[in-house]
Image (cartoon, grey):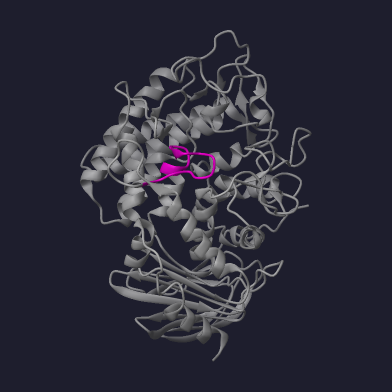
Amino acid sequence: MTPIETALAHLRTGPGHTRTASGPLRDALAAGGIGFAAVGGTLERRWHDAVTELEGCVRTLSGADLPVLTEGGVYPGTWIESTASISAEVLTRFAPPIARATQEQFAELQRDDGLLPYKVTDDGPGFSQIQLVTPFARTVWNHYLLTGRDRGFLQRMYDAMSRADRWLAAFRDTRGTGAVEAFGTFDTGHDLSPRFWFVPDRPRGDARFVDATNPLLPFVAPDLTANVAAQRSYLARIAEELGEDGAPWRAAAAASVDALFAQCWDEADATFYDRDGQGQLRRVQTDVLLRVLECEIGDDEFFAAALERYLMHTRKFLSPYGFTSVALDDPRFDADASRNSWGGPVNFLSLLRAPHPFEVHGRVAELALTASSVLGALASADRFPQCLDPWSGAPGFTEQYSPAILWLLDAVERHFGILPRPDGELWFSGMSPTRLEHGASAIAVAYSREVHGVRFELAADDERVVVLRDGSPHVSFPRGWRVVTDAAGRPIAVVGLAGRTVTGRLETPGGARELSLGPNERLALGSGVRTTPGFIPPQA
């Protein structure tokens, strides 16, 4: 058999096919027909490790009826900045009931004044800080689109998020700037970051109160302000879906964007900084930039400039193993990954959040390039950590950390698997992991997923990718491309995932054709129109 045939056979008959254990996560994977196999290397074992360890992160919290996702590692609960937002958004593709329960508990435990818990543990909800990063409304909206459009779920979450928006406007704009303020380090989850030197970790006793004796507080925070701008933009979509007027939300979102640039944008450095209680910009370059971009701030040109100057620059945020939490050339940068630190190390939460802004702006080739070394590091690691050493890729602080586990599951689907999108598209991606370092490379891989009762399988080696539909050949294309289809699997576009032009043969039910696709280039198969934002390789 060829390597591709071997991978497919193993997918259908190996450990991914015959389950030896059960649980809510594995049950959901089985219901979705999700499986993975690899010939050679360590990836298949690590994928199954990920499933096993993620199952261990799923449990009921005190007083709850349904199992939810927890953060894992040293974090015995679920956090709104991560577990209930970006992690739940990814988990929706694998275990929708668990993702929904994880999000709904925050609405259920909302405080009477509108404040959402920043975490939920066995001790109950916590309200000592706000801790907002990924826009919660975006993850709720995408869950709604991916899981059958349950209006009851959407209405409940909309009501809760609307109350939370009013709370933030009432208590987190003490200077009347229209922006959102941080009262302490933990409001943004930036533990040990030099961004927050000389300010307290938490607000004073309650998330409503700032320490008025601290000369640096409050910070007008770019990531919190961008978060609320994105929240309001998605609340507009949700309002219109529920039959309400979205215009007030869009106006509020635009006002938040205006405040973000008026208060936090530095034209000379072309990045965002906190404005402190003295009215000064605090010029510490952190992953705040990536957080703001995740909130869909700026157009394609704005994102390209951020890539060239910061995110794809090896003296700024692009380390050999992912995006750092502080710029590499900042004298306060600290690479120590052995602690819960946002003072320099690569954090898996940043990596899990990164695909959204890259894909919004069509920068899939840059994303694939930066993810490859991280995949190799995690495939060779002995645990799923919170942090990676940016120099070596060695695993750092904690273990069984669900954002790292979900990053691996997401990366497999996103780069060489089958990924369903909220807009109904399916992505069949062909950056097969045949060129990883440190013995992690596979000779061939195979992935499966059922969509609307149809079983799709994708298998790939170092040269070719084949897609099967209910066991029959459906699409074939060279390594380095992505084929985009509608929900039924009908091809509608081809995209260049590799960092160089790839030439090869596309075979579809409609016929075969020779094509060349550059990095990020998208060819619409119906119209023949080609578009590309260009490509920015790592900068030195």
Q: Magenta residues? A: 68-84
Q: Nearer the viewer, residue 99 or 318?
A: 99
Image coordinates of residue 359 in percent, x first then y, are: 51, 56
Q: Is 82 a magenta residue?
A: yes
Q: Splitting the image into 4 quarters, where does residue 284 fall?
A: top right
| The residue positioned farthest toward the top in the image shown | 213
Q: Nearer the viewer, residue 254 or 388?
A: 388
Query: Is 225 displayed left or right of 381 in the figure?
Result: left
Image coordinates of residue 55 in percent, x first then y, are: 43, 55
Image coordinates of residue 491 in percent, x first then y, are: 40, 75
Q: Splitting the image into 4 quarters, where does residue 329 fall?
A: top right
Query: Is 287 displayed left or right of 202 in the figure?
Result: right
Is residue 512 shown above or below 480?
Answer: below
Q: Nearer the viewer, residue 378 or 287?
A: 378
Residue at horizontal 34 percent and vertical 62 percent from the top: 27
Tag count:
0
Residue at horizontal 44 percent and vertical 44 percent from the top: 70
Is residue 252 shown above or below 148?
Answer: above
| The residue positioned farthest toward the bottom in the image shown | 1
Query: Is 172 displayed left or right of 389 in the figure?
Result: left
Q: Quadrant of the N terminus?
A: bottom right
| The residue positioned farthest toward the front in the image shown | 20
Can residue 107 be seen here? The reply is yes
Q: Is 473 a magenta residue?
A: no
Image coordinates of residue 537 in percent, x first then y, are: 69, 59
Can residue 509 be seen here? The reply is no
